[in-house]
Image (cartoon, grey):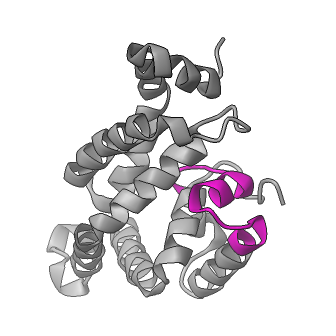
């Protein structure tokens, strides 16, 4: 099986080969973009990511066999261009969880009320993070990237990734349980620590 690096090399002479990279990574990238900026923006970000990647394929670092960090780095940059949509989504989640917006049926289902309140509080706390800390946390939690992969995606040292995740966790620790903070990840222990 060809590595992503092999596919990118092949695509220089045969552009159609790049389609395999899309098939391998588009679903995961789309899920990440959707969580970050909403479904409508995710479609745009996903297609724009692969367009940018295709145009910049000559700059890919072939020391990496896996193109995921590179693609998630491009996607994160594009999401910043859609930052207003992300901010609106977080504000909407925070407002939707407000007690005034909970109807009588939901009040009787205390678990759903608790979940809505947690989502609202979490959205509010995510908005308080710096863009770099939020990107780092969401690449870890939603894109399921390792520390090394986040460092590659964000073009920063691994130590910076650790610091940003630590800062984000400290802020969120006061408002969520560790299970909520990890957004349901199966492995809550740091990878590549």
Which region shows up in magenta? 142-162
**Disc count in the image?**
0
- For the C terminus, give its image quadrant: bottom right
Residue 161 counted in the magenta span: yes
Q: Quadrant of residue 122?
A: bottom left
Left or right: 95, with 33 as reference point: left
Identity of the residue drawn at 73% across and 67% down: 157
For this rendering, which residue is in front, 22 or 125? 22
Q: Quadrant of residue 180?
A: bottom right
Identity of the residue drawn at 48% across and 26% down: 21
Q: Is residue 118 visible?
A: yes
Identity of the residue drawn at 29% across and 79% down: 94
Q: Is residue 109 visible?
A: no
For this rendering, which residue is in front, 174 or 38? 38
- For the N terminus, give its image quadrant: top right
Q: Is residue 47 above or below residue 104?
A: above
For this rendering, which residue is in front, 129 or 106? 129
Q: Position of residue 160 (x, y in %)?
A: 71, 74
Residue 186 counted in the magenta span: no
For this rendering, which residue is in front, 81 or 168? 81
Does the magenta stretch mainly form a helix, a strand or a loop?
A: helix
Q: Position of residue 121 (x, y in %)?
A: 41, 82
Q: Position of residue 4 (x, y in %)?
A: 60, 26
Left or right: 106, with 35 as reference point: left
Q: Position of residue 135 (x, y in %)?
A: 50, 67
Q: Farthest residue in the right direction?
A: 193
């Amino acid at each position: 099986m060809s590595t992503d690096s092999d596919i990118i090399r092949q695509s220089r002479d045969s552009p159609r080969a790049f389609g395999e990279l899309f098939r391998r990574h588009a679903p995961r990238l789309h899920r990440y973009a959707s969580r970050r900026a909403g479904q409508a923006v995710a479609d745009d970000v996903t297609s724009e990511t692969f367009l940018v990647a295709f145009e910049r394929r000559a700059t890919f670092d072939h020391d990496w066999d896996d193109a995921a960090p590179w693609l998630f780095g491009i996607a994160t940059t594009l999401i910043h261009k859609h930052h207003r949509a992300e901010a609106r989504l977080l504000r909407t989640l925070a407002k939707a969880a407000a007690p005034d917006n909970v109807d009588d049926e939901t009040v009787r289902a205390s678990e759903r009320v608790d979940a809505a309140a947690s989502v609202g509080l979490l959205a509010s706390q995510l908005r308080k993070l710096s863009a770099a800390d939020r990107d780092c946390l969401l690449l870890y939690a939603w894109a399921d990237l390792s520390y090394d992969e986040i460092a590659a995606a964000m073009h920063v040292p691994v130590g910076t990734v650790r610091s940003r995740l630590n800062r984000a966790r400290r802020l969120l620790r006061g408002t969520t349980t560790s299970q909520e903070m990890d957004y349901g990840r199966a492995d809550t222990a740091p990878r590549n620590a």
